[in-house]
Image (tube, rainbow, N blue to C red):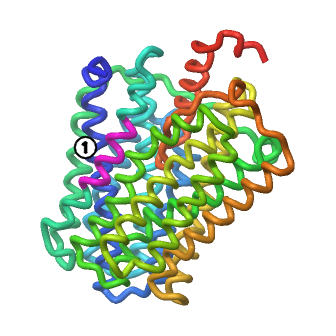
């Protein structure tokens, strides 16, 4: 762990500042949109725009890096993020905010690709698992910290937009001055979606549904809070609780997944997530119970992402796992684009409870589909399944490929016979 910190502290520090900035702007826009009088549907369009940009950036970033290099891509896009953040309060028009969110989503996706390739270059085969764990902790801690910073100023003013802009600008400095040398860059050609669906229908359907659940949390939780009449401190606590649950429950669920049928565990985790959503929908007027529901939903949805990847890997040869990661992220991104728009519509129809109704429907759909798949195909014996590696929905294709490679290395080190299919 200390070796990872000594070799990649500047990168991890820079990424933590970037995540604070990203977490602040996402929640702040939901609060400020309510102050400006934007409708729930208008804010859902704004929030969906981030995932449109993120999906586009994950596809185009590798080409940008190959053409002009890591340093130029990182500096240029981080500067654009900083500029867009500080422009939000100057022009409060829905279409401009939507365009800004597309740009920020695109830039953050490309910045993640750049930073994650640097992180992999700084890690070795012996500490790559620790590096990935630290990276996920840094990402989540940055988002949680960002919610606390929302309490430092009035969201109707200008200061809260300046803070993330400054943090993103500062984040560039340690990374560009301390990371050397610039690594070589290459990514695996993605597997076709048809092939991927043939290997693991459960993984593909689950990733699409989970994209909607995660984007509702990340994009619409603050809009829900504003529409439900929560105060700014309550909204920031509510949003942070999703990510606290994700961190605390990721590893226990991962430990269980290596010891039982993963489809059955996906069914159980989805059912618990659905129950948490129903709790928030029915008893969300009580703030303490609202936090319990957020903890449950966040704590179930994020580990489900890793579970679905591990389940998909169980049906793939080692050489196909990295290629499949691009397809899984693309499917998840499609669901993420639709998530905020659908959530916004349901909140307009059913009131604030439509937020939880949406996540409940998707969780229940995943329960039924997992049950259906269990009934039509036999489970893989536990001793023949691959390793579970904790990954976050915010990972770019680059980090997910490295996580896949680490899972393969872990499996082969524990069972040398696994090298021969």
The residue shown at (32%, 50%) is 19
Left or right: residue 210 compared with residue 122: right
* Above or below, 345 relative to 383: below
The residue shown at (38%, 64%) is 292
Q: How many labels does the image show?
A: 1
73, 57: nearer the viewer = 57
As for residue 325 lying within the magenta part, the answer is: no
The image shows residue 2 at horizontal and vertical percentages of 26, 20
As for residue 136 lying within the magenta part, the answer is: yes
Instruction: Identify the magenta region.
Output: 135-145
Residue 387 showing in the rendered view:
yes
The image shows residue 254 at horizontal and vertical percentages of 52, 38
165, 324: nearer the viewer = 324
The residue shown at (26%, 50%) is 168
* Above or below, 366 relative to 357: above
Prevailing secondary structure class for the magenta stretch in the rendered image: helix
Categorize mark 1 by other alpha carbons within 10 Å: few (<14), some (14-19), many (20+).
Answer: many
Please identify the quadrant where the N terminus is shown.
top left
* Above or below, 223 relative to 66: below
* Above or below, 27 relative to 63: below
Residue farthest to the top, as pictured = 416
Residue 398 showing in the rendered view:
no
- Residue at the spot of label 1: 171
């Amino acid at each position: 762990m200390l070796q990872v910190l000594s070799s990649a502290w500047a990168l991890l520090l820079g990424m933590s500042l970037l995540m604070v900035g990203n977490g602040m702007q996402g929640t702040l826009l939901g609060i400020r949109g309510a102050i400006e009088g934007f409708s729930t549907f208008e804010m859902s369009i704004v929030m969906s725009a981030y995932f449109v940009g993120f999906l586009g950036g994950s596809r185009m970033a590798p080409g940008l890096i190959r053409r002009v290099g890591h340093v130029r891509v990182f500096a240029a896009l981080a500067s654009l993020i900083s500029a867009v953040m500080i422009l939000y309060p100057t022009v409060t028009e829905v279409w401009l905010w939507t365009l800004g969110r597309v740009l920020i989503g695109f830039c953050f996706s490309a910045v993640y690709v750049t930073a994650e390739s640097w992180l992999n270059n700084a890690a070795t085969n012996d500490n790559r698992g620790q590096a990935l764990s630290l990276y996920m902790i840094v990402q989540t801690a940055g988002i949680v910290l960002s919610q606390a910073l929302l309490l430092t100023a009035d969201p109707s003013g200008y200061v809260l937009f300046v803070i993330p802009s400054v943090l993103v600008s500062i984040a560039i400095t340690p990374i560009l001055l301390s990371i050397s040398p610039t690594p070589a860059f290459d990514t695996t050609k993605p597997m076709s979606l048809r092939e991927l669906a043939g290997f693991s229908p459960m993984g593909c359907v689950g990733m699409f549904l989970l994209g909607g659940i995660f984007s509702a949390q990340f994009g619409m939780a603050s809009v829900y809070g504003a529409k439900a009449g929560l105060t700014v401190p309550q909204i920031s606590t509510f949003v942070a609780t999703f990510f606290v649950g994700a961190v605390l429950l990721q590893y226990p669920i991962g430990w269980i997944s290596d010891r039982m049928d993963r489809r059955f565990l996906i069914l159980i985790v989805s059912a618990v997530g659905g129950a948490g959503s129903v709790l928030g929908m029915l008893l969300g007027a009580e703030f303490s119970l609202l936090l319990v529901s957020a903890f449950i939903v966040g704590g179930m949805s994020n580990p489900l992402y890793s579970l679905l990847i591990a389940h998909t890997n169980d049906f793939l040869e080692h050489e196909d796992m990295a290629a499949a990661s691009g397809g899984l992220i693309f499917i998840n991104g499609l669901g993420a684009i639709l998530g905020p728009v659908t959530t916004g519509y349901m909140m307009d129809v059913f009131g604030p409870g439509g937020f939880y109704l949406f996540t409940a429907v998707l969780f229940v759909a995943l329960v039924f589909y997992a049950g259906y798949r269990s009934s039509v195909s036999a489970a893989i014996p536990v001793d023949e399944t691959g390793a579970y590696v904790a990954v976050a929905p915010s990972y770019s294709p680059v980090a997910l490929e490295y996580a896949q490679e680490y899972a393969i290395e872990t499996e082969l080190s524990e069972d040398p016979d696994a090298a021969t299919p």
